[in-house]
Structures are given as structure tokens and as C-alpha cells.
Amino acid sequence: MPTAQVMTDARKRMTEAIDRFQYELQGIRAGRANASLLDRVNVLYYGVPTPLNQLASITIPEARMLLITPYDASSLGDIERAIQQSDIGITPNNDGSVIRLMIPALTLERRQELTRTVGQEQEGAKVAVRNIRRDANEQIKKLEKDGEITEDGRHSGEKDVQKLTDEMTRKIDELAAEKNEEILDN
């Protein structure tokens, strides 16, 4: 059945869009220490950009503190510099053997700003899913035009694509609601 391939492709692409959305949400600081906050930090280590989590262990000794212990003590300065240059907005405290990141409590205005950011990311993910729906519907219409499926097959295929779109949109809304709750509860 030709529409099955279109559906498989659409599901795969929509799932990738949701994965990207989740990745973007991880970068939004919610006032609690979370090691995923440092996932985007790359350290210039011997001239090669290297993910921080490959150069150091990241632990959470307290609710609002991240402790970064480098595997190679000589990389401490490079790690500190990379954190300062990153977009996480937290100043590292280097004591010579470890780096401490104190996560500041969020003000009400900052919380509201973060929920707006979540909303923008949410809308971007929904737009991506809708674009994939449009592409899938165009492929189904092309299949009908080429005589590979009937008009009823096209209607059925479009209905299936819409169900998938609704399911993925619901998932995006759930993820955004969870992140907003996490931001507002701290």
C-alpha cells in the first residue's frame, strides 16, 4: 500500500521534530540543577571542540548546584572558559580542582519570560509538524494523480495523516505543559 510508506515517513519526521523540541526544552533553565543544562557546552580541548560531559563528571550535590569535576585537571581552565562563553547565563566558580555552578532562583519576571520562550519553541515544533502534514498530504495527492490510489484511498490517507498530526501536536502540548509547570513550581 503506497500510503503506508507516506505515513511511515511522516511519523519518522514528526518524531524527529518532537525530539528537536525536547532538546530545545532541555536548554531552558528552570531554576533547578540539571546536568542536561550543560549538554550544549563544548570545550576547546587540545584544539578540538569536545562535549563537556566527555571531559568531566557532572554531579548535583544540592538542589541548586552543579559540580563539575574534570577527568584531566589541566582542562579546568578550558572548561571554565567554555561555560562563561556559553549561553547558559551562569558564572562558574573555579576552586582549582572543581567548578561549581550555582543555579540562581528565578524571579517572577524571568519565569514568565521562560514560559514565553517555551511557548515560542512549542509553536515552532507545531509548525514543523504541520509542514510535515502538508508534505504528506501532497504526496498522497500525487499518488492519486499518478493512479496508484483511488479517491477514497486519498481521503483515507489524509484522515490518517491528520490523526497522526493531532497525536503529535498533543505530545508537543504535553511536553510544553510539563516544562511550564517545572518553571513555575520552583
Image: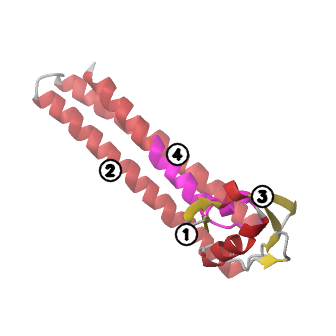
Question: Label 2 is placed on what type of residue?
Answer: Asn
Rounded to the nearest whole Å, what is the CA distance between mark 3 and mark 1? 35 Å
Residue drawn at 72 percent across, 60 percent down = 182
In primary-sequence order, the first of circles 3 and 1 is 3
Residue tagged 1: 117
Residue tagged 3: 71
Q: Is residue 147 left or right of residue 83?
A: left
In primary-sequence order, the first of circles 2 and 4 is 2
Question: Label 1 is placed on what type of residue?
Answer: Thr
Magenta residues: mostly which secondary structure? Answer: helix
In the image, residue 171 lies at what x, y percent?
54, 45
Tell which of 58 and 134 is nearer to you.
58
Tell which of 176 and 98 is nearer to you.
98
Dividing the picture into quarters, in which one does residue 45 lie?
bottom right
Callout in the foreground (1, 4): 1
The mark found on residue 131 in the picture is 2
Rounded to the nearest whole Å, what is the CA distance between mark 2 and mark 3? 44 Å
In the image, residue 111 lies at what x, y percent?
67, 74
Residue drawn at 84 percent across, 75 percent down = 96
Dividing the picture into quarters, in which one does residue 68 lie?
bottom right
In the rendered structure, which segment of residues is drawn in magenta?
15-40
The image shows residue 144, relative to residue 16, as above or below, that is above
In primary-sequence order, the first of circles 1 and 4 is 1
Q: Residue furthest left?
A: 146
Residue tagged 4: 170
Callout in the foreground (3, 1): 3
